[in-house]
Structures are given as C-alpha cells and as structure tokens.
Image (cartoon, rainbow, N blue to C red):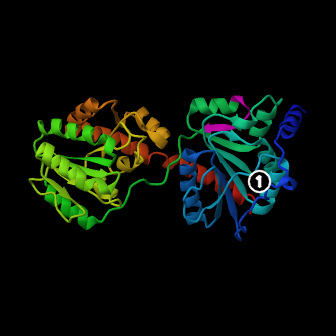
C-alpha cells in the first residue's frame, strides 16, 4: 500500500543513533502508578494550552500527565520529557515505558514513526488547536501517502478555525472547528490590603505604568510623561525598572532634569498628591501595578532587545497595553492581541507620547483593555470539548 511505502521510506531516512559510538541511552523517570495521559506540544506557545489542559486532567480526573515538548514547561505536577527520537525503536521504547492511555498532540506537527507505533499499541490519538498538518521540519520530504496515513490515526482533530479544519480534512483527517483552547490564567496576584490602600491614596488620579523599563528606554518614557502632563497635570507614572539598582540614578535624573517629585517603593515612600513619578524598585509586585494602572507600556519592546514581560499579564488585569516593535519571545501572543485590536503598537518615542496621550481618554483605554481581556479569557468552551473527548476515549479503554 502507498502509505506503507511512505512510512518505510520515512523510517529509512531517519538519522542513526548508535549507542556503541558513545551516545547515552535515554533517561526516563519512573512511571507513576495509575492512569496516564500523554500530551505533546511542538513549541512554547502550544505548551501553554497543554499545561492548562494538564492541570484540568490532574485536578478533575486524578490522572498522571506526561508532557513532551522542547523546553520544560515549569508546570507543577506535570512530568516533562523531550519527545523521543523519531524512529520505530525509540518510539516503541517510549510507549513501552510510559504506557499512556491516550495521546494528545497539538497544532499539527506529525511524527509518523511515533504515531504509527502508538496506533499499533492501541493508544487513541487526538489533535487539538490544529493549525495545519506538517512533518517534522528536519524530516520533510516526499513520502507517498505518509501524511494521509498518519492523519488517519487520529480519532479527531479540533481545529482553530474553519480554514484550518479544511486543511486537515483535505490531508485525510476527521476535523471539526472548535477554536483555541484556554491558557493558564496570567492574572498575577497581589496583596489586597496594599491595593486598597494605594487606590485610596491615588483617589481619582490618572496612572500609567512602565513595566520592566530598561535604561535604553528611560528617555522615551520620560518624554512621553512630560508631554502627557500638559494634558493631565495630575498624571502619575509608576516605573518598575528592569534593574532595581537603577532606581536611585533614575530618581536623581528626574528630579534634576524635570523637577519632578519622585517617591521610591523600596524606601517606604508613598505616592502622595505631589508625587509625579513612583519608582516601584521591587520585582514581585507586578500584579499590584497592573491593577492600579489603566495603561501599561511594556519595557524592552521599543529600543531594547525585546519585550521583557508577557502581554497577557496586563491584559488579564484590565490594563491597556502599549508596546514597541520588538516583541521578543512573545511574538505569538502579540499577534493574537494585535489581530483582536487589543494593543496599541508604537514605532518610536514620538509614537509613545502620542499613544499615551490618546489612551488618557478613559473610554479608549477601556475599549483596548476589554478587547485584550477577551483574548486572555477565550477558549473555555474549546477546552471543555477537548476534555469531554479525552474522557470518552479513555473510558473506552478502562
């Protein structure tokens, strides 16, 4: 059959891993007792939704969860492993060790050797958050019928949208449109007593935040604040420096060059009615500052090496986001927020001043924040559908 020829050619093309030449055997932790679900994410973006799915499976179903992905997900209770080498022997060793009751792939990365071995072992397979099917980049090539035979292993593909679902159907999969699954909440905690006290202290003052501000972007933020003060003379800037050691020098500069009244969190000073800038030279209170500031500029995104904080953090707490062109490791998240018109991108220090002045209108900031919150809170229905499918297939094996 065509798919057998394709799979044979694919397996023959696999790079050889010879233990006799010094390659260490794969080290795997002991398998926990009981039922185990295996989730796979091809990248960090996909891992976020897999982590939330894992949390639900552990908390609600009492399952052990193995997550294979390129980097450790940092999720409590989840067993992390690199994906096995894409050969029949390594796939069999992986499956024999973990004995999963289900395999849950994401996005569309296909590992034919692993997936065909999983089918032979009787492991039901599904694919979630489907974008488009593709073979491993380093194993791409022409293998007759391989894509179709591999996709036929899946009981269902839950796709992000209808064009994605059509792409999977054309390639041989059974697919439905469910939308994106939800991610772990990005809402950072804060001490409620601190929030309430500072809210009373600030009264009705307009506030904006420069989060993780690097030295290279200090001038741009100061210029934007200076310009905005002409429109809103009671405006307070909260600055969280990327390096807390910059607090003293930054405070001295603002007092000398601008004549502003500056208070520092680490010195136990409070932002009273005369304070123009409050330097939050601490590193663990972003949840507090996002709640207090209706507008957040994400540091590192304008002139530095790339955005230093996830945009989902202020989005989850109702703060309208301004960011520069350097999105760093958060390109996928900014792409989703941008598609929803939920962020205000700027390209230069002058644009930052203009964006800040524009968002001082409460209605405009609120519209942006609401759109961003909608992005962070989406996906509950898709996750519930995925959980129902997983439970149905696992119950069939019980």
Place of residue 183 in the rendered image (x, y in percent of width and height, measured from the top left): 50, 50
Residue, disc 1 = 123
Residue 2 image point, x, y percent: 87, 31
User: Between 149 and 155, which is closer to the camera in this rendering?
Assistant: 149
Instruction: Name the quadrant of the N terminus.
Output: top right
**Residue at image point 9% right, 54% down:** 273
- Residue positioned 34% across, 46% down in the render: 214
Q: Is residue 121 visible?
A: no
Q: Position of residue 189 (x, y in %)?
A: 36, 61
Q: Secondary structure at mark 1?
A: loop
Residue 279 appears left or right of 158: left
Residue most extreme to the bottom: 33
Magenta span contains residue 19? no
If the image is split into quadrants, where does the C terminus sit? bottom right
Say whether residue 137 is visible: yes
* Residue stretch in magenta: 170-176
> Which residue: 82% across, 41% down?
14
In the picture, measured across the screen, residue 315 lies left or right of residue 113, that is left
Label 1 environment density (alpha carbons within 10 Å; few <14, some 14–19, many ≥20): many
In this view, the residue in front, 365 or 169, is: 365
Q: Is residue 304 above or below residue 398?
A: above
Compared across the picture, whether 371 is left or right of 358 comes to right
| Circle count | 1
């Amino acid at each position: 059959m065509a798919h057998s020829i394709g799979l044979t050619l694919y397996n023959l093309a696999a790079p050889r891993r010879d233990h006799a030449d010094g390659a260490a055997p794969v080290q795997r932790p002991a398998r926990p007792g009981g039922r185990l679900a295996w989730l796979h994410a091809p990248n960090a973006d996909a891992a976020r939704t897999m982590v939330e799915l894992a949390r639900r499976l552990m908390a609600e179903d009492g399952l052990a969860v193995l997550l294979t992905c390129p980097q450790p997900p940092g999720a409590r209770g989840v067993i992390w492993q690199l994906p096995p080498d894409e050969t029949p022997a390594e796939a069999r060793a992986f499956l024999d060790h973990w004995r999963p009751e289900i395999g849950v792939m994401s996005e569309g990365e296909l590992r034919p050797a692993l997936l065909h071995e999983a089918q032979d072992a009787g492991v039901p397979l599904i694919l979630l958050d489907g974008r488009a099917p593709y073979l491993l980049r380093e194993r791409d090539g022409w293998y007759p019928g391989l894509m179709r035979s591999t996709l036929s292993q899946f009981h269902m593909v839950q796709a992000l949208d209808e064009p994605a679902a059509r792409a999977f159907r054309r390639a041989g999969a059974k697919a439905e449109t469910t939308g994106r699954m939800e991610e772990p909440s990005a809402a950072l905690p804060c001490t409620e007593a601190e929030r309430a006290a500072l809210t009373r202290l600030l009264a009705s003052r307009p506030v904006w935040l420069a989060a993780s501000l690097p030295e290279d972007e200090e001038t741009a933020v100061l210029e934007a604040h200076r310009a905005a003060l002409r429109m809103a003379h009671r405006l307070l800037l909260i600055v969280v420096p990327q390096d807390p050691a910059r607090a003293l020098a930054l405070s001295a500069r603002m007092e000398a060059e601008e004549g502003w009244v500056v208070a520092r969190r680490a010195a136990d000073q409070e932002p009273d009615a005369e304070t123009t800038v409050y330097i939050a030279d601490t590193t663990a209170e972003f949840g507090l500052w996002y709640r207090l500031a209706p507008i957040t500029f994400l540091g590192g995104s304008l002139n530095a090496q790339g955005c230093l904080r996830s945009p989902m953090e202020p989005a989850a707490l109702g703060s309208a986001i301004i960011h520069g062109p350097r999105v760093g490791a958060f390109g996928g998240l900014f792409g989703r927020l941008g598609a929803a018109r939920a962020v205000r991108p700027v390209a230069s220090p002058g644009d930052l001043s203009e964006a800040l002045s524009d968002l001082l209108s409460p209605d405009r900031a609120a519209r942006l924040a609401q759109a961003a919150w909608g992005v962070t809170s989406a996906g509950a229905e898709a996750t519930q559908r995925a959980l129902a499918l997983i439970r149905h297939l696992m119950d069939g094996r019980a």
